[in-house]
Amino acid sequence: MPQWLVNLMTTEKGVDPKLVIDKMVQQTDVNSNQGRLLIPFNQIVEKDFLNEAELNIIDEHQRGDSKKGVDVIVVASDGRRWDANLRRWDIMKTPYYALCHGWNDVVQGTKLKEKVGHIFRLWSFHSQDGTKLYLAFFHQPTAPDMPLPQAQDQHPDQAMHAASSSSVALERDSVNLGQIIVDLNQPLVQDMAPLEDVQERNDSRTSTVYFHLGIGPQDMIAGLHRNQSLRRRRRTSSSGCGFN
């Protein structure tokens, strides 16, 4: 039994708690034109939630000997109360308990229309003398929407101070990897080497290839000269001038 129900029963001096139903709220349950909560017999968890006197009243109403069912006090976990009436309906030969006459007030007071598709757990308990029937449920008010933080324009001095603070924070949070300090303010990718150095390394690799292929020194030198001549012609072309 949940603590909120224990507290509620203590306040109301209630006894004999029963779990009536775990019911998914349907659109018809919150429709003001319907004005009732249907409780199917085959979904009731503890079927003995009504005492003998209440069962007799239900039967009398079902037979048409009485115009009124069982008076019920519907109470939410926050202590709010509503008067309602419980009776039996047979719909297409299927028996239901119907909570009527006051149910629309419960729907409106708890914004139950926003909870269609949610599970609605209904408990019962009685007054100590057994003359009052309570149907209780947990109600959690909808939390108000939290405002989103608004972006604010910063004065240039404030922006500069914020940037400086971020730089100091990054410097303070430099990562210590063993004996290596990685400063998060420094780029992790080194600057590219000059193009001339790249070409010199390529020439060196070309020489190595020639050697492994068994090409003689004179042929290798001739090949290098051809490579250099081709590079000069490409640089001349990229500068916007045509070939002579």
Image: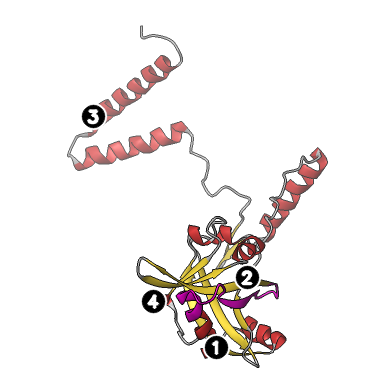
Q: Nearer the viewer, mark 2 or mark 4?
A: 4
The disc labelled 2 sits on which kind of residue? His
Q: How many other residues sit within 10 Å of disc 4, few (<14), some (14-19) or many (≥20)?
A: few
Confirm or deny contact between disc 4 and disc 3 (CB under 8 A): no
Spatial CA distance of label 1 from label 2 is 29 Å
The numbered mark, 3 or 1, whose residue comes first in the sequence reads 1
Q: Position of residue 118 (x, y in %)?
A: 50, 65
Residue located at (48% from left, 38% from top): 193
The disc labelled 4 sits on which kind of residue? Asn
Residue located at (22% from left, 29% from top): 219
Spatial CA distance of label 3 from label 2 is 95 Å
Q: Nearer the viewer, mark 4 or mark 3?
A: 4
Disc 3 is placed on an element classified as: helix
Residue located at (45% from left, 31% from top): 196
Residue located at (51% from left, 82% from top): 19
Q: Position of residue 244 (x, y in %)?
A: 36, 6
Quick one: 28 or 69, which is closer to the camera? 69
Quickly name the residue at label 3.
218
Q: Which residues are magenta?
A: 59-81
Quickly name the residue at label 2.
139
Q: Nearer the viewer, mark 1 or mark 2?
A: 1
